[in-house]
Image (cartoon, rainbow, N blue to C red):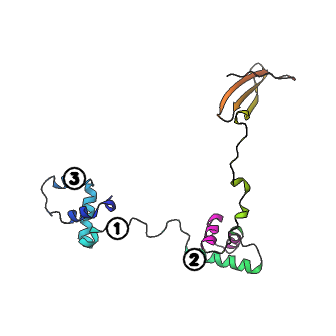
Amino acid sequence: MSSRIPRHVRQAIIEFPDKPRRGEITRFCAEHHISIAGFYKIRGQARRDGPEAAVVARSTSPTRQAGRTPAVIEQQALSIREELTRQGWDAGPISVASVMRRMGLVPPSRATLARIFTRHGVVTPQPQKKPRAAYHRFRYPDPNGCWQLDGFNYKLDNGQNRCMMRGVLVRVRIGLMTHRRHVRCGRLRLRLWC
């Protein structure tokens, strides 16, 4: 990439002779660990914009943010929110999106509207509304005691019904038993395969 080429190498590329001997550019590029395309890109930039512009690497950041909501839409969303608040209605992202749709506009997503409101400081943070489950991770007290038992009925070609059962230890997702049994009323004995 030509933007990562150091300043002293760029200067050497600019000062490189216009008519080099055969293999000289390849040797130069190999010594400085740059591509031949990068070499010619800097040479072209020096001819086009001048040697001073070619010595300094250009910014690789985009000129505008690709997914950014246009300022006009942001201002409309903020004004709709202000109007809903003044009238005493709920002024959350879902309500604002609904009003925008009624006006014939295509609103951004609910999450985008929430980020716009937060960025402009029109919402007050309320951390007490965070769900309690977010504070601690669920952990079953006895991991080896958590089992999953799946069963299904299977009809054989001769017309008999068979009940297929499979037991799985959830913690490690290992199948510990598989059992087939003729379907009858009564107790079902299962054997563990360990």
How far apart in space, not on screen, are marks 1 and 2 (Cα)? 30 Å
Residue name at image x 22 percent, y 52 percent: 31
| Near-viewer residue (40 or 1) | 1
Foreground mark, 1 or 2, reads 1
Amino acid under disc 2: Val
Badge 1 crowding class, 10 Å Cα cut-off, few under 14, some 14 to 19, many 20 or more, is few
Residue name at image x 28 percent, y 59 percent: 38
Q: Which residue in the rendered view is the most extreme toward the right? A: 185
- Quarter of the image for residue 98 reads bottom right
User: On screen, 80 above or below 33?
Assistant: below
Q: Residue 72, which numbered label? A: 2
- Please tell me whether the stretch drawn in magenta is mainly helix, strand or loop: helix
Amino acid under disc 3: Glu
Q: Residue 58, which numbered label? A: 1
- Magenta stretch encompasses residue 162: no
| Near-viewer residue (146 or 47) | 146
Badge 2 crowding class, 10 Å Cα cut-off, few under 14, some 14 to 19, many 20 or more, is few
Foreground mark, 3 or 1, reads 3
Badge 3 crowding class, 10 Å Cα cut-off, few under 14, some 14 to 19, many 20 or more, is few
| Near-viewer residue (11 or 165) | 11
How far apart in space, not on screen, are marks 3 and 2 (Cα)? 52 Å
Amino acid under disc 1: Arg
Residue name at image x 70 percent, y 31 percent: 168
Identify residue for label 3: 31
- Quarter of the image for residue 39 reads bottom left
User: On screen, 177 above or below 1?
Assistant: above
SS label for mark 2: helix
Q: Earlier in the sequence, mark 3 or mark 1?
A: 3
Q: Earlier in the sequence, mark 3 or mark 2?
A: 3
Residue 171: x percent and y percent?
Answer: 67, 36
- Magenta stretch encompasses residue 102: yes
